[in-house]
Amino acid sequence: MYLAESGGALSVLNEFHNDAILCKDKSIHWIFVVSKPVLAETDNIKVLRYPWIKKSWFHRLFFDNFVAAKLVRKYDADKILSLQNITIPYTKIKQDLYVHNSLPFIDYRFPFKKNKHLWVYQNIIGRSIIKSIKNADEVIVQTEWMKKAIIEIGIVNKNIEVVPPKINLDVKSFFEANKHTLSTFFYPASAFDYKNHKLIVEACKILKKNQKKLNIRFYLL
């Protein structure tokens, strides 16, 4: 089950979908529940699309609390892999939870007046994420930092597996350095405040001020 439609979240969805296609055991039947993404179906892969989920928070909550569990029963699922940080309520089926949102675990707390969306995510949805981690049978995170952050809030009796995202790039050619080469850095991230783009810009300014001869190039994607 996944409701992503852009950015890194969509990349994770595509990665799992590709793994399902490549899975050699064709007796396993996969059902992907998504919002807007269009995924390929095969003999053992079925895709259920619910684009209306993205209309509002109400639509999302309605789906989570009244539709998701019905789908589990309808398709007689043996196991759930939730890729959306939150487990499916009202079902006793074994659930593995993929947690990729770090907002509930960072030290900085977003004021309601500054960013209502992130405040809601930290203080309301964040609680649901932590509750889901406690209820899940297994938890998957992308980094050791996330695993440590979960343990630090008191969730210790949980199987937490670190699985970094795969980066599949079709490299056509490689860059050859020369005397004019600059140190180049890429930071691919969506434009949310907690991604700290401003912090990177300020750090670059300080580096440039203190190291006059330092030549670097930074791409924020």
Image: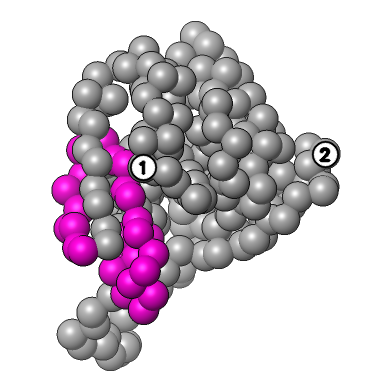
The amino acid marked with disc number 2 is Gly
The amino acid marked with disc number 1 is Tyr
Q: Nearer the viewer, residue 31 or 160?
A: 31
Q: Image point 24% across, 19% down: which residue?
A: 55
Q: Nearer the viewer, residue 138 or 167?
A: 138
**Picture coordinates of residue 157 (x, y %)?**
82, 48
Which dot marks residue 75?
Answer: 1
Over which residues does the magenta segment extend? 15-43
Q: Secondary structure at mark 1?
A: loop
Is residue 198 shown to the viewer in this render? no
Q: Residues within 10 Å of mark 2 (few under 14, many from 20)?
A: few
Q: Image point 23% across, 31% down: which residue?
A: 50
Q: Secondary structure at mark 2?
A: loop
Report which residue position mark 2 lands on: 154
Is residue 131 shown to the viewer in this render? yes
Left or right: where 158 falls relative to 70: right
